[in-house]
Amino acid sequence: MSKILTIGEILVEIIATDRGDGFREAVPLIGPFPSGAPAIFIDQVGKLGQECAIISRVGDDDFGWVNINRLAGDGVDVSGIEVVPQGTTGSAFVRYREDGSRAFVYNILHSACGNIELSTDMLGLIDSCTHVHVMGTALYAPTVVASILTAVERIKGSGGTVSFDPNLRPEILDTPGMREALQTVLSKTDLFMPSGEELFLFAEAKNEADAIAELLDKGIKAIVVKRGAKGASYFDGQTTLNLKGFKVEEIDPTGAGDCFGATFVTFWLQGASPVDALRYANASGARAVTRAGPMEGASTKFELDTLIKMQGKA
């Protein structure tokens, strides 16, 4: 059976309850919610009953333990999370603007997870895994990049596989070394999962069909393009699929793409057909937006089956 690993930031998210542009005035807040793209991803994997683990660091504070307790409770191997006695767990304050875009205030780089180094025990954890999922957001610091590339090399070297979700925010794209790290990961990727225009950050082609062909020619086995509420598409050397999304009431879209990716990767590794994996992933992304808080909408398989049955095979 596969064991899925991810490495990167763990943080809490604190959300403004009214809309506006940023935090230059006092606003009411709710939270803390467990968060961090890799943490959301691996929590959704765990909720599906798939063996999985995360490597990260948190402070020995309430924000760190709210994450550890959630992840462990949902079936994630948390032995790779280092608890730093005098450290501070990362945080993100989020406020939605009137147009639906988001304003963030982050504390990641200078938090506990701003520095992740691999101990002997963590190398052993990596070697127990057969698949590593890389999030572009996790390529934010040199030690984290080095840890991720080590995991990619060791897992690929032992016959495992790699999935890669660029998940790029504009403010981190020009971080020193970011573009080089992205290209290194892409060269090892089996399953590539970009959203929208991210596809064109990795291909010279100017239209989607040519970009897909270009990337598949580089050795990527399969590509899933996430299209938000519109659904998603799947491409490999023989197959092209387009499935529409599920209709739900959106409360909070944060984490939906991470839940989508986790669900697709889990079903893909378990040998599901591309159409089934894509359908479950669409359902997972849809359910994720119906709860406030980035990790609150993670789903069990029963919950996904219920949504699919209610709305038919979208």
Image (cartoon, rainbow, N blue to C red):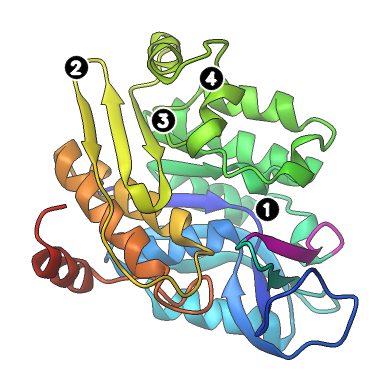
Secondary structure type for disc 1:
loop
Marks 1/4: CA distance? 26 Å
Mark 4 in CB contact with mark 2 (< 8 angstroms)? no
Secondary structure type for disc 2:
loop
Crowdedness near tag 1: few (<14), some (14–19) or many (≥20) residues, C-alpha within 10 Å: few
Crowdedness near tag 4: few (<14), some (14–19) or many (≥20) residues, C-alpha within 10 Å: few
Give residue 65's position: percent from left, percent from top. Answer: 62, 83
Residue type for callout 3: Ser
The answer to whether residue 208 is left or right of residue 185 is left
Marks 3/1: CA distance? 19 Å
Marks 4/3: CA distance? 17 Å
Residue in the image at 59% along x and 84% along y = 66
Q: Which mark is residue 238?
A: 2
Mark earlier in primary sequence (4, 2):
4
In front of the other: 259 or 81: 259
Was residue 17 drawn as part of the magenta stretch in this picture? no
Q: Which residues are magenta?
A: 101-110
The answer to whether residue 7 is left or right of residue 297 is right
Crowdedness near tag 3: few (<14), some (14–19) or many (≥20) residues, C-alpha within 10 Å: few
Marks 1/2: CA distance? 42 Å
Give residue 39's position: percent from left, percent from top. Answer: 54, 63
Marks 3/2: CA distance? 27 Å
Residue in the image at 40% along x and 68% along y = 288
Residue under numbered circle 4: 187
Residue under numbered circle 3: 158
Was residue 104 drawn as part of the magenta stretch in this picture? yes
Residue under numbered circle 1: 119
Give residue 45's position: percent from left, percent from top. Answer: 36, 60
Mark 4 in CB contact with mark 3 (< 8 angstroms)? no
Secondary structure type for disc 4:
helix
